[in-house]
Image (spheres, rainbow, N blue to C red):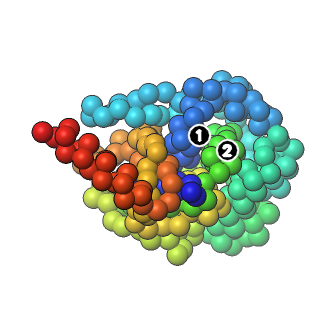
Amino acid sequence: MSGVLVIRTPSGLSGDMLLAGLAVMAGEAADIGSVLAATGLPLPPDAVEIRPHALQGISGWQARVRLPHEHAHRRLGDILALIEASHLSAPAKTVAARAFTLLAEAEGAVHGRPPGEIAFHEVGALDSILDTCVAAELLARIAPDRLVCSPLPLCDGTVRCAHGPLPTPAPAVQELLRGVPVRGLASTGETVTPTAIAFLRAAGFAFGYWPEMVIRQTARIYGGRVLPEVPNGALFALGDAGLAPVEQRSKGLTELGSEST
């Protein structure tokens, strides 16, 4: 059977949510420090913790990132060199490099400059490098055959960046959303970060409904923001493509019926 990884995003998606969700799906949440150390990236081994977190009484997971503040404004070439010099697996290097290339192309389109001349601000910081590169490594370890994400939610609001307050979605996100199904959300603020949409596109996610699959594991992942009046958190699911054999489905329905009596 071929593996299927599904992400559903009722309130949006960020880089740290991707990192947490993929860590849980890969079975590496408790040992994320070892994963980080193995990448050979210039990051502290205790830079991230994947910990249980609950919201409105519903348990899930959340990434807690602890990194020193820095003022470096890296260019695409700097980040690609860092990725190439790392110990990331070959598939992870490909996804990570593609994600930052897409970000540079989007920023270049926004500012009317070649991608190589763009000085990354927020997305060139250590936390974005951590989120993207480690998420790419975790995805390579899971190695699913199919990747599916729900249409992405968008709403009006404001996001603050190095250029000052901007309307949501941020300009680079607008560029990266070309061709991506979206839906309106009755809330305000940033729902999809540049790191998240660049990763989804670089990894090759399709956007649409739930596929036919037999679910093996799920996890609810929370970000650092809570949007009012909407269901918060993203759902990650990993399983096998297609439907279960008839005899397994019949057994499952029988068990469900006995539980409800």
Give the amino acid type for the residue marked by disc 1 in the picture: Ala
Q: At 66% across and 27% down in the image, what residue appears?
A: 33
Circle 2 sits on which residue?
141
Instruction: Name the image quarter holding the N terminus.
Output: bottom right
Distance between the alpha carbons at the discs numbered 1 and 2: 7 Å
Residue projecting furthest to the bottom: 179
**Secondary structure beneath label 1:** loop
Circle 1 sits on which residue?
26
**Camera-side residue of 143 and 105:** 143
Q: Indicate the position of residue 89 as horizontal and vertical percent values.
A: 78, 46
**Camera-side residue of 213 and 107:** 213
Q: Judge left or right: residue 205 versus residue 190.
A: right
- Is there a contact, CB below 8 Å, between mark 1 and mark 2? yes
* Image position of 234 with respect to 49: above or below: below
Q: Indicate the position of residue 67 as horizontal and vertical percent values.
A: 64, 30
**Camera-side residue of 27 and 7:** 27
Q: Is residue 54 visible?
A: yes
Q: At 50% across and 49% down in the image, what residue appears?
A: 238
Instruction: Name the image quarter holding the C terminus.
Output: top left
